[in-house]
Image: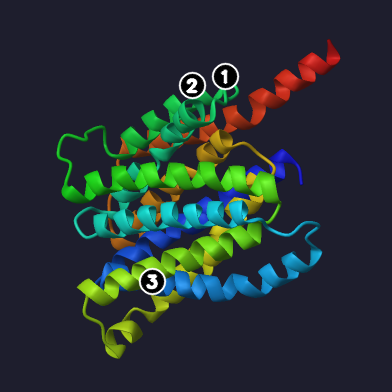
Amino acid sequence: MSRIQANLLLLFAAAIWGGGFVAQSTAMKSIGPFWFIGLRFAVATVVVLPFVLMESRKARQPLTSRNWLSFVMIGVALFGGAATQQLGLLTTTVTNSSFITGLYVVFVPVIAVIFMRRSPHWIIWPAALMALCGIYLLSGGSLSSLTTGDLLTVICALFWAAQITLAGSAVNETARPLAISAIQFAVTAALALAVATLVEPISLASIQAALGEILYVGIFSSGLAFALQVIGQRYTTAPQAAIFLSSEALFGASLGALVLGETMGPLGYAGCALMFAAMLAVELVPELVRRRNAAA
């Protein structure tokens, strides 16, 4: 798979996640956040499991205990991101949640530099700044009235950055993207259901009321999109992946406006344009530099 194809997979995953913001918000009219997280990722685990078995038959080397531990840690990071995002949606809008979550585009290269001693391509820094400015403009140019949900979503962005970084490293080491997906889903489901059992009421009626959202987010936003993420990350870098995945803010804000009636003014559209410019810069500049160096 080429880097362009990988980045298009990541863009598709971001579009699916953007739609998931609406489902995540409406589901909590019927069900608690931890039950929703647990059930969506249980569905995702079941969806991806047959493909994991096919992948394992073709694997050249068995997974080591170190690999399994890294997969579990990815699941813990995913649980942290899912929990803080879902709790945040109780007191913030879909639009705010989608663009604040996109802050991971800035956190990923910082994590790469601080913890992994990896220097990304120079274009990542101006592109990350452009994406951050785009996310800011999507808010209407004002973050002075942050709610508890907004602050939880900032923490969510940190967890997503960790998950993207860990998943990128693990898939490059093991070439087992579907196994990574299944383990991270199962870990997240187990942790969420354990918390839900302790702190949230549940009934069959509430599950039935939120079943459409659970299935959409479980099958598409979780099972399909996260699988696309780890597959795509095998052929691109974590900072580049973060740029493309951050477009979920654009899709989330747009669908929030269309489905829930949340408005987006001229500044929001300017933010969308900046984010697309950042994605194009990340895609085109390294390729142009490579071709110029090859021709020299």
Q: Secondary structure at mark 1?
A: loop
Q: Which residue is mark 2?
A: 126
61 above or below 281?
below
The CA distance from mark 3 to mark 2 is 38 Å
Residues marked 1 and 2 touching at CB (< 8 Å): yes
Taking depth in this image into account, of 14 and 176 the one nearest to the observer is 176
Relative to residue 177, is residue 208 drawn left or right? left
Disc number at residue 38? 3
Q: Against 12, is 172 above or below?
A: above
| 204 displayed left or right of 15 | left
Q: How is the image coloured?
A: rainbow
Amino acid type, residue under disc 3 in the picture: Gly
The reply to whether residue 31 is in sight is: no
Residue that numbered label 1 is attached to: 122
Residue 221 place in picture, x, y as percent: 49, 63
Quadrant in which the C terminus appears? top right
- Left or right of residue 142: residue 237: right
At label 2, which amino acid type do we have? Answer: Pro
**The furthest residue to the right:** 295
Q: In front here: 238 or 277? A: 238
Number of other residues with Cα within 10 Å of mark 2, as a class: few under 14, some 14 to 19, many 20 or more: few
Residue 66 % position (x, y)? 60, 51
Are the two marked residues, 3 and 2, in contact with CB atoms closer than 8 angstroms? no
- Say if residue 21 shows up in the picture: yes
Say whether marks 3 and 1 touch (CB < 8 Å). no
The residue at the point 21 percent across, 72 percent down is 199
- Structural crowding at the residue carrying mark 3, measured as other residues with C-alpha within 10 Å and reported as few (<14), some (14–19) or many (≥20): many
Identify the disc placed on residue 294.
none
Residue closest to the far bottom: 204
Asked which quadrant contains residue 22, the reply is: bottom left
Mark 3 or mark 1: name the one nearer the start of the chain: 3
